[in-house]
Amino acid sequence: MKILIVNTLYAPNQIGGAEKSVQMLAENFALIGHTVKVICLDKEDSNYELANVHVQALKIKNNYWPFEKKTKNHLQKFFWHLKDAKNKSYDSVFRKIIGDFNPDILFTNNLSGFSSNIWSIAKSLRVKIVHTLRDYYLQCPKSTKFKKNSNCTKNCLNCKFLTTFKREKSHQIDYLIGISKFILDDHINNGYFKGVHNDVIFNGFNLNLNKSKERRNETIVFGFIGQIKESKGIEFILKCFTKITNTNWKLLVAGEVDEVYLTHLIGLNNSSKIVYLGHVDSKDFYTKIDVLIVPSLWNEPFGRVVLESYIHKTPVLASNVGGIPELMSINKEFLFEVTPSSLIQQIDRIILNPEVLNRFNFDQEFFSKFSIEKTVNRYLDIFNSVLTNKQ
């Protein structure tokens, strides 16, 4: 099978879990003999080979590269999103790519920068389309549905204006996949993908589960890893730790953070018990902590770090938002509401009685739902069903 994959970013350009998940799928499709080509965006055009996957990066055709650290003003962002809402700049090159590669399936993922207009191109060339929801780009230009420190319950005027075209185009695809039931239902309930066959397929992982580990000392070491920004809950967690009266704890924060924001975070909580590690190897990180805290404020479509923590046999405290509860369904007692009292209660409970962590369930049967092999096979089954019109 010839599979053409589209995702905004691809290795070595990686920001979040979406890029990791798409790369794992692409490489595993290629590993079992399928011909795979990935189209992504970059600052300049380029072609390269990575693990038997041919990658063609297209130069961004908008006002600026949106993934640089330099902040843009509201007007610059608005005009970027205005062009992105119906960006036809890739029509000719995308038409040529499809013509040259002649794919059986167009497999789209995050589309920020490309625009959903590429679906129309594929449709006009009679190429079957399977789309996976990994963010809220189709409903929100920022891809988060998160504003003023809270999740959006309805589209603001800007979002309505900038996403109407995307909603109309969504009905063109042949099959829809959500990486959680939450994100799938959220789009369907908001009028997207009417009449499109759909299913939930969790992100896949190499499930080489680590052995259970013993705590090394009396101090409970909590951990936070990922993108260090407000929507991920870093400020929320720091404020909660100012209310912890017991001193038998330590917090390790892993992830890149610029000096200005770091100064702000230290201003929120300047405890010497909090250590900022910067970018670290996740394998090393999990050996240093007793429990991971995932304090996301926004409705995470999935919550990749939850599964990564499972794999490293590290218990998780996680906020009860988005798709995260689906990953914590066998460990509901370790979920917390996004309120200070709820998280503080969980932290205090563990500090006062560390044996609580022994109740965290690392059930093998549950984990098997997230194996990369199972995920790949489910995708291929759907691709085949779409091609044979059996969905």
Image (cartoon, rainbow, N blue to C red):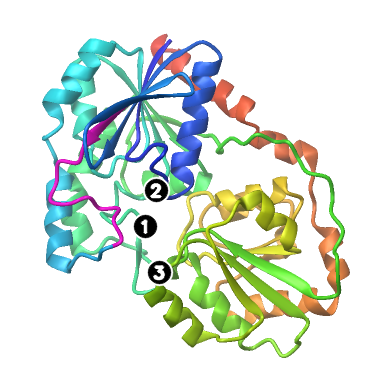
Q: Residue at x 83, y 45 (%)?
A: 211
Compare residues 390 and 130 and report the one nearer the observer. Answer: 130
Residue holding disc 1: 144
| Lower position in the chain sequence, tag 2 or tag 1 | 2
The label number, if any, that marks residue 258 in the structure image: 3
Q: Main secondary structure of the magenta part?
A: loop
Q: How far apart are labels 1 and 3 at the CA level?
A: 21 Å
Q: How far apart are labels 3 and 2 at the CA level?
A: 24 Å
Judge whether residue 315 can be spotted in this image. no
Residue holding disc 2: 135
Label 2 neighbour load within 10 Å: few <14, some 14-19, many 20+: many
Label 1 with label 3: CB-CB less than 8 Å: no
Q: Which residues are magenta?
A: 56-69
Position of residue 122 relative to residue 243, above or below, is above
Number of marks drawn: 3
Q: Residue at x 19, y 47 (%)?
A: 164
From the top left corner, tell me how far across and down residue 48 is, in percent: 35, 25
Give the amino acid type for the residue marked by disc 2 in the picture. Asp
Name the quadrant containing residue 77.
Answer: bottom left
For residue 36, side relative to residue 118 (left or right): right
Tell which tag, 1 or 3, sits nearer the viewer.
3
Q: Secondary structure at mark 2?
A: loop
